[in-house]
Image: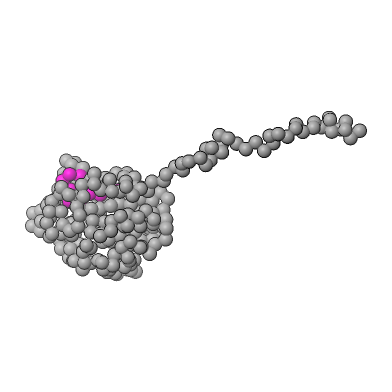
Amino acid sequence: MHLDVLDLRNFYYRTNLGRVAQRAIRDQVTQIWPEAKGQCVAGFGFAVPLLRPYLREARRVIGLMPGQQGVMPWPAGQPNVSVLCEETNWPLGTGMVDRLILMHGLETSENPAAVLEEVSRVLGPGGRALFIVPNRSGLWARGDGTPFGFGRPYSLSQLEAQLKSHGFQPEQHTAALFAPPSHKRFWLKTSTMAEKVGRRISGFYAGGVLMVEVSKRVYRPEGPGLPEAVRRPLRVLEGLSQPATGRTIKTNLR
């Protein structure tokens, strides 16, 4: 089940560990998507902490928060862009989104297949989605002291297999949260160094969260259709006699 929006807000905005986690994940997001000028950027679950870098240049930014979780106004001090929605029926037009981030949305859903169908529906041509889920082999999924200790943790192979089964093509993957989920000052102060060292040592095994970027597959039409028509073109003049030449026509007129 989804976490409560107040618990998520308190963790990310009112605890030092939450701010460290927010920064570490957001740095990886902006490395994958450095800019989104003129694009429609959306987030589902509780992805709003990761959307702030795109507020200035994106054509539109939307924070989708499922009803089971609840909604909060965001961003603070600016016009609100967050909206409460049904988990499997988002108030977005088909093909409207260029960039979509899911965090605390897939692993806590009671119907992940329907969530993935909505992702596929709202992504436009050339659109990309970024899934951020708890790493099954990471430390952050082993306790309930953070939001990543709830829901279904994934291994990379499990996540990619589920995404492929719903028509998505994994493009790249990475990880974040290599420091332990500790509120102790030492780990908080060394978290930046832990992120740098962790990414060099392990691409995803030791990170607290997995991050997989996908595109939507576009299938080549199959069956008789156009190829058959090209191989067997219609011969509309078959069976007709050769048309008379200009010389013959002139003779006949005489």
- In this view, the residue farthest toward the right is 254
Magenta segment: does it hold 249? no
Q: Is residue 82 above or below residue 126?
A: below
Tell me which corner region of the image, top left, top right, bottom left or bottom right, holds residue 6.
bottom left
Above-or-below relation of 251 to 91: above
Q: Quadrant of the N terminus?
A: bottom left
**Residue stretch in magenta:** 204-213
Residue 52 visible in the shown view: no
Q: Position of residue 104 (x, y in %)?
A: 24, 58
**Magenta stretch containing residue 210, yes or no?**
yes
Seen as rendered, the residue at the extreme front is 239
Q: Nearer the viewer, residue 232 or 250?
A: 232
**Residue 138 left/right relative to 68:** left
Residue found at x 15% / y 53%? 141
At horizontal 39% and vertical 55% (from top left) the residue drawn is 121
Q: Is residue 3 left or right of residue 235?
A: left
Percent coordinates x, y for residue 17 in the rendering = 15, 59
**Is 3 placed left or right of 117 in the picture?**
left
Depth order, front residue of 24/135: 135
